[in-house]
Image (cartoon, helix red, strand yellow):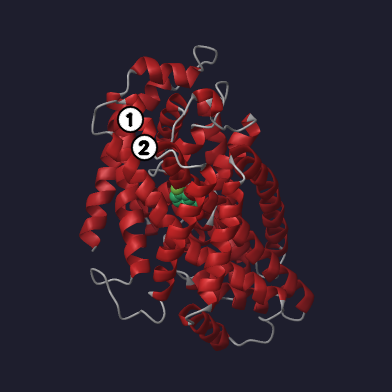
Amino acid sequence: MNKIDRAGFGSKLGAILASAGSAVGLGNIWRFPYETGNYGGAAFILIYLGCVFALGLPIMISEFIIGRRSHANTAGAFQKLAPGTQWKWVGRLGVITAFLILSFYSVVAGWTLEYVFEAAGNGFAGRTPEQFVESFDLFSTNPWRPLIWLVLFLLATHYIIAKGVEKGIERSSKVMMPVLFVLILVLVGCSVSLPGASAGIEFLLKPDFSKVDSNVFLAALGQAFFSLSLGMGCLCTYASYFKKDTPLIKTAVSVGLIDTFIAILAGFIIFPAAFSVGIQPDAGPSLIFITLPNVFHRAFEGMPFLAYIFSLLFYLLLAVAALTSTISMHEVATAYIHEEFKVVRKRAAAIVTGGCIIIGVLCSLSLGVGRNIALFGLPLFDLLDFVTAKFLMPLGGALMAVFVGWYLDKRIVWEELTNDGALKAQSYKLIIFILKFIAPAAIFIIFINELNVI
Ligand code: PFF
C-alpha cells in the first residue's frame, strides 16, 4: 500500500485521545484498585508511578518510533525497519497477543453490559450480599446470556473499526474520552462525600511502607504494562497513523498522565465508598461484579435514586472504558490482515470479529458449562489471561525496547524524537539508556519471578 493512501489520525489531539483510549480500560477501573488494595494503598501507587514514568513511557516511546517511522501495521513495521531479519516475528507475536487478549477481554467487557442493563432496570435494589454473589455466579455460568453480551460488545467494536481510522477510531475516542472523564468525576464527587469516606481517602494518600516487598514492585510493573497497553503493537499500530508533526515524547507523557490520573480517580470512587460501609475491596473479578454493587447499594441506603444513578453511571463508565480499549486491540489485527494480505479493510475487520467471537465464546463457556475442560490445567479463559499478560506482553515489550535500544539506527530514533530536528529531545540519552539496559533487565526479572510463581 502506498503511503499517500494510508489512513491517519486527523489531529494531534485525536492521536492523544485514541492512544489514551487504548490505555484507559478495565485495567484502570478494575485491576488498578484491587492491586492497590492488595499491595498497601498509597505505597503501591508511588511505586506504580515510578514504573509508569521510568519504564513504561520509554517503552511506549519505542512503540511510537517503530509505528510512526514505518507507517505500517505492527508486523509490516518490523519488516520495513529490519528487512530480511527475524524481527518480523516480534510484530507477528504482537498481532497474535492482541487477538488473544481481545477474545477474553471482550468476555469481561460483555459482563459490563449485563450490569449496565441490570442497573438500568434497578435490578440491584433490595439484594442481600449473598444474592449479589449468587446472581453473579448464575449469570457468569449461564450458557447463553454472557455470550449474547460478548457478541454485542464485539459487534460494537467492529462497527467503529469498520468505519475507519479517522471516522471510526478517532471520532469515537473524541466523544468517549470526555464522556468517560465526566462520568468519573461525577462518581468521585459522590463517593468522597459519603459519610465515613475519609478512611478510604486516607488509605489512598498515606503510604504504608511496611507492606512493600519485591512482590509489590513486580505487581506495579506488571500493572503499568497492562494499563499502558504495552508490548503487543497496539500503540505501534496507532502511531503508524500519527502525522509527521505529532511530538512523540509529549504524546507519550500525555497518555501516561491521563492513564495514571484515571486509575487514581477510579481508586477515589471505589475506596471511599467501600470504606464507608466497612467493606475491604478484595481481588479478582468479584471486586467490580460482586463487591461493588453491594457497596454502592449499602453506601446510598435510604437514597434509592442516588444508589440507582451511581450504579448505572459506574457500569456505563466501565463499558465505555472497555470499548476504547477493545477497538485498539481489534485495530492491531485488522490493520495486519488488511495490509499484509491485501484484504479490503471491512472484510479484514469482519475476519477479526468472527475469529474473536469464536474464541471469546469458548473462553466464556470455559467459565460455565465447560468448566471441567482444562487446557494445561486451566480453563481457556484463565489460560489466555495467563499466557498473554504474564508471558507474551512482557516478552513483546522487552523485544521492542531491545529493537529500538540496540538494533535501530540511532539517526532514525533521533529524527523521530525530534521530528527531523524541529523539536528538542533533552531526554534522548536517558531514553536510550533505559531502552538498552533498564527495561530489558526489569522485564527479565518480572518474567523469572512470574515463572517461579506457577
Ligand atoms: N490498557 C487496557 C486496560 O488498561 O484495560 C488493556 C489493554 C488494551 C491491554 C490494549 C493491551 C492492549 F493492547
Kindly identify which numbered label has been placed on residue 75: 2
Q: Is residue 448 left or right of residue 127?
A: left
Q: Is residue 371 left or right of residue 25?
A: left
Residue at coordinates 56% horizontally, 70% vertically from top-left? 149
Question: From the viewer's perspective, is residue 241 above or below residue 119?
Answer: above
Observer-nearest of 99 and 452: 99
- Is residue 73 among what the camera can see? yes
Question: From the viewer's perspective, is residue 365 above or below residue 435?
Answer: below
- Is residue 35 among what the camera can see? no
Observer-nearest of 371 and 229: 371
Quadrant (top left, top right, bottom left, bottom right) of the C terminus? bottom left
Cα separation, mark 1 vs mark 2, equals: 7 Å
Question: The residue tagged with tag 2: helix, strand or loop?
Answer: helix
Q: Is residue 437 left or right of residue 286?
A: left
Q: Position of residue 256 (x, y in %)?
A: 52, 40
Q: Position of residue 389 (x, y in %)?
A: 36, 55
Q: Position of residue 112 (x, y in %)?
A: 58, 67
Kindly identify which numbered label has been placed on residue 79: 1
Extreme residue toward the top, this view: 421
Q: For mark 2, does the 10 Å Cα neighbourhood hold few (<14), some (14 to 19), or many (20 or more) residues?
A: many
Q: For mark 1, does the 10 Å Cα neighbourhood hold few (<14), some (14 to 19), or many (20 or more) residues?
A: many
Question: The residue tagged with tag 1: helix, strand or loop?
Answer: helix
